[in-house]
Image: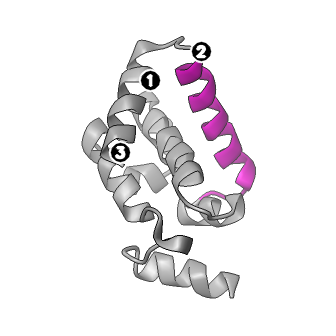
Amino acid sequence: MQQELIYTMVVNPDVHTPRGRVKVREIVEIITSYFNISSEKIRSEVRKKDIVMARHFAYYFTCEKTELSLKKIAYLFNRECHSSIMHGRDVICHEVFSAKTPNYVDAFNYIKSQL
C-alpha cells in the first residue's frame, strides 16, 4: 500500500494526499514560483543558499499540509533519509518563529497565504 501511494504520487503528482488536504505539486509550484527556480532543483543535490532555502520550505509545508510520513516525503524529494526532511523543517521553524531572518519570515507568510 505505501509503495503504491508513493508510486502514484511520483507518476501522477496531481493526486491528492490523504484526506485531500493539499497536493504536493501545489506546494512545490508555489515555492518554486516564489524563489524563481525549477522544481527539478528542489529535488537536486545543489547546495546553493537560495535553493536550499526553497527546499527547506518545501519540506516544512509538505510536512504541515499533508499527512505523508517523513519517509515518503524524503522519497518524493529524492532524499535518502527522513532526517534531511526533519532538519529542513526544523530550520524553517527556527528561522521563522524566532523572527531571526526577515527574508524567511516574508517567504513563509507569502507561501502560507497561497496554500
Marks 3 and 1, how far apart at CA: 12 Å
What's the magenta region? 79-97
Q: Secondary structure at mark 1?
A: helix
Disc 1 or disc 2, which is closer to the eye?
2
**Which of 79/3 is in front?**
3
Task: Give the mark nearest the N terminus, 3 or 1.
Answer: 3
1 and 2 marks in contact (CB < 8 Å): no
On-image quarter of the N terminus: bottom right
Task: Give the mark nearest the N terminus, 1 or 2.
Answer: 2
Instruction: Read off the residue under disc 2.
Output: 98
The numbered dot on residue 104 is 1
The relative height of residue 23 versus residue 115 in the rendered view (above or below) is: below
**Which of 12/108 is in front?**
108
Q: Quadrant of residue 27?
A: bottom left
Point out residue 80 in the picture as x, y percentages from the top left corner. Answer: 69, 59
> Disc 3 marks which amino acid?
Ile
- Residue 91 included in the magenta stretch of the image: yes
The relative height of residue 106 versus residue 22 in the rendered view (above or below) is: above
Q: Quadrant of residue 29?
A: bottom left
Label 2, residues with CA under 10 Å away: few <14, some 14-19, many ≥20: few
Q: Quadrant of residue 24?
A: bottom left
Residue at the location (63% across, 23% down)? 94
Marks 2 and 3, how far apart at CA: 21 Å
Disc 2 or disc 3, which is closer to the eye?
2
The relative height of residue 3 versus residue 36 in the rendered view (above or below) is: below
2 and 3 marks in contact (CB < 8 Å): no
The numbered dot on residue 31 is 3
Point out residue 9 in the picture as x, y percentages from the top left corner. Answer: 49, 77
> Disc 2 marks which amino acid?
Ser
Residue at the location (25% across, 45% down)? 33
